[in-house]
Amino acid sequence: MKPFDLQVNGYAGTDFNGDNLTAESLHHACEALAEDGCESILATFITDQIPTLERRIGRLVELREQDDLARRMITGIHIEGPFINPIKGYVGAHPPAAVKPANVDDAQRLLAACAGLAKLVTLAPEHDEGSKTTSFLVSQGVTVAAGHCDPSLDQLRAACDAGLSMFTHLGNGCPIQMHRHDNIIQRALSLHERLWLCFIPDGVHVPFFVLKNWLASIGLERTIFVTDAISAARLGPGRYTLAGWDILIGEDLVARSPDGTHFVGSTVTVPRIKTNAYEQLGMTERDLTRVLDVNPRKAIES
């Protein structure tokens, strides 16, 4: 098994989304990821102003080129936002002031900053008029995911027709209370034959009994596990930052906003995912190989 994590915002004290990334801190994060059995990752950047994203992405690209381990570990970049839904609940921990409708011009700027490393973009289909940005990104060889969004079923289907092929951390990036039937989770699950569905299997973002129900319903054919790890992963309880935002890690190792109103990324690691899968979800090593290794690679390469 060679785990490929599609969503890593930072690790072991290193924040990819910060303005203080150094060669040493990047190398340290990659060493820690390797020690935890991760073969490769997509370094993930969350919503911010376009110039800020360009600067932060450019810095990581520059430092990666100077480090053999970083080049092996970071095989691409995941841009999560800023083309998401700004409504409270759906926007999650992303700064609403920096959220904007999807557009090709800004997408081009972000791809240019990635210097060929852009592999995955998460956006809200309902804020991508005519799925134009989705179509453009797919034409550039980028996998497009829905996430932090609330498209109607028709909008989600239209986005799939335009090339959207994934859903980012399903069960999160949405309000605690929604319509009991017609909600974004049910819409995405109904399209599981067309979408790669990503989950954070930490028992917090989605309770294990719920995730177990979903997996029993949709199977593992198009299921992907991600960590959504932040800089606090591996560090234990305390106060940390993600893209300049304060984060509180409790004794339960859950990353929350200081006021406790929402989750902010995750501190789960690949070793903990494996333990959770075996002990809480009844999965086998073959199952884990599929959701941590085989499926992520297929999703990005297809």
Image (tube, rainbow, N blue to C red):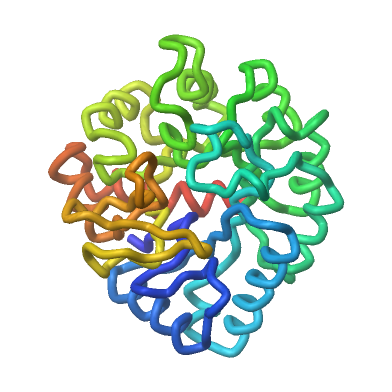
Image point (50%, 80%), residue name: 70
Which residue, as the protein is rendered here, is positioned at the far left?
A: 279
Please indicate whether residue 159 sits to the left or right of residue 35 in the image: right
Q: In the displayed structure, would residue 97 be above or below residue 73? A: above
Closer-to-camera residue (292/210): 210
Closer-to-camera residue (80/257): 257
Tag count? 0
Please indicate whether residue 294 sits to the left or right of residue 105 in the image: left
Please indicate whether residue 73 sits to the left or right of residue 300 in the image: left
Which residue, as the protein is rendered here, is positioned at the far right?
A: 105
**Which quarter of the rendered picture does the N terminus lie within?**
bottom left
Closer-to-camera residue (271/11): 11
Closer-to-camera residue (205/289): 205
Image point (73%, 53%), residue name: 141
What is the x, y in percent for residue 207? 25, 33
Image point (59%, 65%), residue name: 76
Q: In the displayed structure, would residue 103 be above or below residue 214? A: below
What is the x, y in percent for residue 154? 68, 16
Image point (65%, 44%), residue name: 144
Q: Quadrant of residue 35?
A: bottom left
What is the x, y in percent for residue 112? 79, 66
Which residue, as the protein is rendered here, is positioned at the far front?
A: 259
What is the x, y in percent for residue 161? 73, 27
Please indicate whether residue 106 sits to the left or right of residue 23 in the image: right
